[in-house]
Every structure is written in structure tokens, then in C-alpha cells.
């Protein structure tokens, strides 16, 4: 083929390079304690990133502010390596006065942008380490009513700085109708407060299959999730789920909850997209506002 250049292979080349280097992703989880954050992370990545409560040393002192804990794990699947970092925020919303609970979390996100900016400004920019937060799962308590003032304040303060992904925690404690009404109410609150949450983007050249996939994901936001690192028996088959007297809620069953759709977006289809948006839009806007303030 004369004149054939072969640009079509460029995306593959990028892909092969990343496969060799391994992928890297930083996820933050925020929400009141007991909402199932640690369990969901374990369920999402099918790993025991968090050891069982039983093996944990009891802590006696209660911290005065929101703690920020970072856990990293190298996971591998079919020869593809992922360096996963999870930033946990135990204690969020647990204080008598939670007014400023969002502040240490925003500061942590911005400190990570600063660290990146500082590396970019170095003479030698060969080995930039990216510790920026690529997505933030915000756990909404399954009250079935509406967002709490704390939820709204947190999301308002953090939107525009991080990819916000709201999830309804422990959705197995609500009925299908309750979830439907709760979702509508949450989306109303988000729209009313002009909070920018993460939306998978649509591109003009997307094939119909991708368009449908994205629509399916978007239609589930805020994701009603169920986490479980235990397997239960359903008709002789072992599935991840939670057992009730009336039956089993299956984590990996799309008819039972939105876990599969959340995982699909976060891991299977939009991980690179989330990183790109963080770099090109969120970090860029932080950098520009910092420059305007004379920060660098
Ligand atoms: P965290 O404090 O937010 O990290 O919450 P944990 O992951 O430690 O979970 C707190 C408790 O809630 C544990 O007893 C979990 O087994 C339970 N739990 C976690 N996820 C779910 C869920 O989706 N549904 C229900 N019903 N319970 C859950
Ligand atoms: Mg936890």
C-alpha cells in the first residue's frame, strides 16, 4: 500500500506503553463512618485493601479533625498492572460541629496539585510523580429523604477541584421505589445548588454502542451501591452479596444495584478519561487561579 502511513495504530502504541509501565490511579472516598467505604473499595478491586475489622488494633483516642489515610496496593489482572492509591477520610461528618469538615479534604486535594505544579516547574521534569486525586466517591447516607446540609456544603466546596461521583451507600436498606425517589431528590438538590458532578463525556465520533453505554451509566447516577466482601449461597452458586430473611441482594447483579455500572465507569471504561479530565480541566483551572493569585 503506497502512501499508507498507519496512524491508526497510534492509540495502540500508547496503550502498549502504558501496559508496560503499568497504570496508576488515585481514588478518594468520603462519607460518614459506617457507610461502607472500606467495604466498597475492597469490593470494587476485589482485594482486601482494608483488613477485617476484627484484626485491627482498637483505637482509643478520637481525633479532633478529619483524618486522611492513604493506602496503596499493586494489583494485577491478566498481566496488566495497576498501582491503586485510596485516600480515605475517616471521621468525616462525625463531629459535633462538622461545618468545616470539607476543609482538610480540599486542602489535601490542593496540596497534591501543588506537589505536581512544583515538579512541573523543575528544570528536570523527567520523573514527575502524579499523586493527584482522579476521582472522589462521595457516600450519601441511605436516608431516603434528601441531601443533608453537610452533603451539599461538601459537594459545593469540592466541585470544580475533583471529579465528584455521588453514591447512595448501603442501598440494600432501601426499597426500589425509595431509591428511585431518593435519586430524583438528590439530582434536584445537585441541580438547584449548581453542583458540578462527574458526567461521562459524549463525543461526536462515538460509535452507537459507546453512546448507549455512556447513557446507561449516566442514567444510574447517583449510583445506588451495595458492597460486600463475603460470598453467599444463591441456589448452590456462590455470589458476592448480602443475605436477608427474604433473599439475597447480589452485588454483581445489575437488577439489584448499580455496583456493576459504577465499577464499569471507574475501572473498565472511564479510568483514563477521569485522569485526563483531572489533568486538563481541574488541575489546569487550579494552576491558573494560583498563577492569578501570584502563587508561582
Ligand atoms: P466505613 O466506615 O465507611 O469504611 O464502613 P465499613 O466498610 O467499615 O462498613 C461498616 C459496616 O457496614 C460493616 O459492618 C459492613 O459490613 C457494613 N456494610 C458495608 N457495606 C454495606 C452495604 O452495602 N450494605 C449494608 N447493609 N451494609 C454494609
Ligand atoms: Mg473505613
Image (cartoon, rainbow, N blue to C red):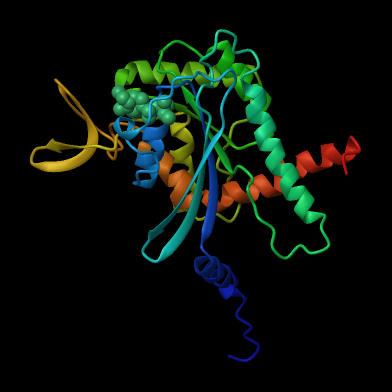
Residue at 52% x, 71% y is: 16
Residue 42's x, y, as percent?
37, 40
Residue 202's x, y, as percent?
58, 46
State the residue in front, 248 or 60. 60
Task: Choose top left, top right, bottom left or bottom right for residue 50.
Answer: top left
Q: Is residue 159 visible?
A: no
Residue at 64% x, 46% y is: 277
Give the left or right position of residue 55, taking residue 203 as reference: left
State the residue in front, 156 or 107. 107
**How many numbered markers are drawn?**
0
Q: Is residue 289 visible?
A: yes
Whether 163 is drawn above or below 157: the answer is below
Q: Which quarter of the rendered picture does the N terminus lie within?
A: bottom right
State the residue in front, 234 or 113. 113
Residue at 78% x, 55% y is: 120
Give the left or right position of residue 195, taking residue 71 as reference: right
Residue 41's x, y, as percent?
41, 39
Whether 72 is drawn above or below 36: the answer is below
Task: Choose top left, top right, bottom left or bottom right for residue 107.
Answer: top right
Residue at 40% x, 33% y is: 38
Residue 262's x, y, as percent?
43, 39
Give the left or right position of residue 282, taking residue 292 as reference: left
For the view shown, which residue lies furthest in the bottom direction? 2
Q: Quadrant of ligand 1?
A: top left
Amino acid at each position: 500500500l503506497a502512501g499508507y502511513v498507519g496512524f491508526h495504530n497510534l492509540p495502540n502504541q500508547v496503550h502498549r506503553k502504558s501496559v508496560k509501565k503499568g497504570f496508576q490511579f488515585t481514588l478518594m472516598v468520603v462519607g460518614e463512618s459506617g457507610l461502607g467505604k472500606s467495604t466498597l473499595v475492597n469490593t470494587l478491586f476485589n482485594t482486601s485493601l482494608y483488613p477485617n475489622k476484627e484484626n485491627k488494633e482498637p483505637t482509643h483516642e478520637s481525633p479532633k479533625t478529619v483524618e486522611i489515610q492513604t493506602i496503596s496496593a499493586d494489583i494485577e489482572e491478566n498481566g496488566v498492572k495497576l498501582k491503586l492509591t485510596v485516600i480515605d477520610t475517616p471521621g468525616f461528618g462525625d463531629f459535633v460541629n462538622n461545618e468545616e469538615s470539607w476543609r482538610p479534604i480540599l486542602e489535601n486535594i490542593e496540596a497534591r496539585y501543588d506537589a505536581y505544579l512544583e515538579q512541573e516547574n523543575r528544570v528536570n521534569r523527567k520523573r514527575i510523580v502524579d499523586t493527584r486525586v482522579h476521582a472522589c466517591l462521595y457516600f450519601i447516607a441511605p436516608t431516603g429523604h434528601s441531601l443533608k446540609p453537610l452533603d451539599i456544603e461538601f459537594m459545593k466546596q469540592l466541585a470544580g477541584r475533583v471529579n465528584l461521583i455521588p453514591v447512595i451507600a448501603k442501598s440494600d436498606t432501601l426499597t426500589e421505589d425509595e431509591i428511585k425517589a431518593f435519586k430524583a431528590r438528590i439530582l434536584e438538590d445537585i441541580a438547584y445548588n449548581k453542583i458540578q458532578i462527574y458526567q461521562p463525556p459524549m463525543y461526536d465520533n462515538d460509535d452507537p454502542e459507546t453512546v448507549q453505554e455512556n447513557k446507561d451509566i449516566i442514567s444510574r447516577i447517583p449510583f445506588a451501591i451495595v458492597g460486600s466482601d463475603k460470598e453467599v449461597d444463591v441456589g448452590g452458586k456462590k455470589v458476592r452479596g448480602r443475605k436477608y430473611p427474604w433473599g439475597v441482594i447480589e452485588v454483581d447483579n445489575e437488577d439489584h444495584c448499580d455496583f456493576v455500572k459504577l465499577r464499569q465507569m471507574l475501572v473498565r471504561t472511564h479510568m483514563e478519561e477521569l485522569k485526563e479530565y483531572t489533568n486538563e480541566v481541574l488541575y489546569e483551572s487550579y494552576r491558573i487561579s494560583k498563577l492569578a493569585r501570584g502563587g508561582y
